[in-house]
Image (spheres, helix red, strand yellow):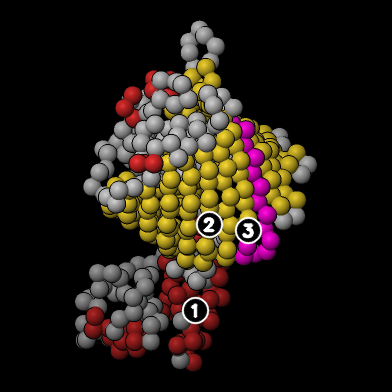
């Protein structure tokens, strides 16, 4: 074995890094060295490498694991070797087979442990141009960032943390989509999601600060932006998916960041609890959902006051892979008057933009009656005012194109018509790029 090791050192199979270099680039191996020609040949063929500091360290004492690493490297480049070196590498492979198996087992364990923590995220950058009812134009750029960290505790349990910028706060509560460029809030970046997920019998349970999902189209609440502190659980009941959630939704908000609505003062919306109930099923190409949502103001030593309560019905019909029609209807049953909204959409093209070249066009028309929607919570583009009880319509065209698996582009045109206050009408263009990682 000494002879083999000496021979290997002699022909300079002494490397662990990933750059190939001729021997003259190794500052610790002069031309006068007896192994210079051998190292030059092997380095030129890419069979051996050097260290990042441009040294070869040919006199370094090796452990068996280090030698096994060298043998594995030589085996990977065996096709570049001559007949004599191939024979030598074959002998070394037999000698160090057990050590290389142990190394591979350690690598497999490290890779397995790394999979227990997964990172993903999104960077969205948007340019928006608006024109109001008298022709006044306004243009600005916006952006938002999200980083998701999911830790696998065991096969049934995960812990999820999300860092978001912007995120709901006393000063950023209305900005439910993006920051305007140059208008960052010092408290904009926060952990807006922190929750654990586990299985309890047939139920999937989430506890902590988690996204608030009220309806399939996010019309009532933008679930990508707003979270709640509480508990949710879901299960499958035969052919139906059932879920329930309850917790504290909005808290610690300034009176200037919330609005009066539906006969309630601004202060009523500063500490809000929410509970949701959802039931959904798929019948072939038809997808059906029924949702119930309640927002209430908690008052100490008094019954809670219901601010809004919605019954929501949603249906999607996928005619084929590239054409879908959807409908959502909801009603705020606690509205002073009216309170209903409806939205119809048609999607032409791919619904998942997971590969370069995929594209789609979505046309949506929504109609909102008085007291149907609290603008601050919704993902919809709404009239530019703080009075949220008006009747309005929204006609929206959105074209999406995947430039790669991780990068997509969306061009959107919208026409907002306020039926109560026409001076609040406006049209807009949006160009959005979204990076996912």
Closer-to-camera residue (292/369) = 369
Please say whether residue 68 is one of the residues in the magenta stretch.
no
Closer-to-camera residue (21/365) = 365
- Labels 3 and 1: the sequence-earlier one: 1
**What residue is drawn where x is 26% and y is 43%?**
184
Where residue 297 appears, as percent x and y from the top left, is 48, 19
- Labels 2 and 1: the sequence-earlier one: 1
Q: Dots 3 and 1: beta carbons under 8 Å?
A: no
Q: Is disc 3 surrounded by few (<14), some (14 to 19) or many (20+) residues within 10 Å? A: many
Q: Which residue is mark 2?
A: 363
- Labels 3 and 2: the sequence-earlier one: 3
The quarter holding residue 48 reads bottom left
Closer-to-camera residue (178/243) = 178
Task: Provide the residue span drawn in magenta.
Answer: 310-324
Considering only vertical position in the picture, is 276 above or below 305?
Answer: below
Where residue 342 appears, as percent x and y from the top left, is 58, 42
Q: Which residue is mark 3?
A: 324
Q: Secondary structure at mark 1?
A: helix
**What residue is drawn where x is 56% and y is 30%?**
338
Where residue 104 appears, as percent x and y from the top left, is 53, 64
How far apart, in angstroms, are the residues tagged by discs 2 and 1? Answer: 58 Å
Q: Which mark is residue 75?
A: 1
Q: Secondary structure at mark 2?
A: strand
Q: Is disc 1 surrounded by few (<14), some (14 to 19) or many (20+) residues within 10 Å? A: some
Label 3 vs label 2, nearer the camera: 2
């Amino acid at each position: 074995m000494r002879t083999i090791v000496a021979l290997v050192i002699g022909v300079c199979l002494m490397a662990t890094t990933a750059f190939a270099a001729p021997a003259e680039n190794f500052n610790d191996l002069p031309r006068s060295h007896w192994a210079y020609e051998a190292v030059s040949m092997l380095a030129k063929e890419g069979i051996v490498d050097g260290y990042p500091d441009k040294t070869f360290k040919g006199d370094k004492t090796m452990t068996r694991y280090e030698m096994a690493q060298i043998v594995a490297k030589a085996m990977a480049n065996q096709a570049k070797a001559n007949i004599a070196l191939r024979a030598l590498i074959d002998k070394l492979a037999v000698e160090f087979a057990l050590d290389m198996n142990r190394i591979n087992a350690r690598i497999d364990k490290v890779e397995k442990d790394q999979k227990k923590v997964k990172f993903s995220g999104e960077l969205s950058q948007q340019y928006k141009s608006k024109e109001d009812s008298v022709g006044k134009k306004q243009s600005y750029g916006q952006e938002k960032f999200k980083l998701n960290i999911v830790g696998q505790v065991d096969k049934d349990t995960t812990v999820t943390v999300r860092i978001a910028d912007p995120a709901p706060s006393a000063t950023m509560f209305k900005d439910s989509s993006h920051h305007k460029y140059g208008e960052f809030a010092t408290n904009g970046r926060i952990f807006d999601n922190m929750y654990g997920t586990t299985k309890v019998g047939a139920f999937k349970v989430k506890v902590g600060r988690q996204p608030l999902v009220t309806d399939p189209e996010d019309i009532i609440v933008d679930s990508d932006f707003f979270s709640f502190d509480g508990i949710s659980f879901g299960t499958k009941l035969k052919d139906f998916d059932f879920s329930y959630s309850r917790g504290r939704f909005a808290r610690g908000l300034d009176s200037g960041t919330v609005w009066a609505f539906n006969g309630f003062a601004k202060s009523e919306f500063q500490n809000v609890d929410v509970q949701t109930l959802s039931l959904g099923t798929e019948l072939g190409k038809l997808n059906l959902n029924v949702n119930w949502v309640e927002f209430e103001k908690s008052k100490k030593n008094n019954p809670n006051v219901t601010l809004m309560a919605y019954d929501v019905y949603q249906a999607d019909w996928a005619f084929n892979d590239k054409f879908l029609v959807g409908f959502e209807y909801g009603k705020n049953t606690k509205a002073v008057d009216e309170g209903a909204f409806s939205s119809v959409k048609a999607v032409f093209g791919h619904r998942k933009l997971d590969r370069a070249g995929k594209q789609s066009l979505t046309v949506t028309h929504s109609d909102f009656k008085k007291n149907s929607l609290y603008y601050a919570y919704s993902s919809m583009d709404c009239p530019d005012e703080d009075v949220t009880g008006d009747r309005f319509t929204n006609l929206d065209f959105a074209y999406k194109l995947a430039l790669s698996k991780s990068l997509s582009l969306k061009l959107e045109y919208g026409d907002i018509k306020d039926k109560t206050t026409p001076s609040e009408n406006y049209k807009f263009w949006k160009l959005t790029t979204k990076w996912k990682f």
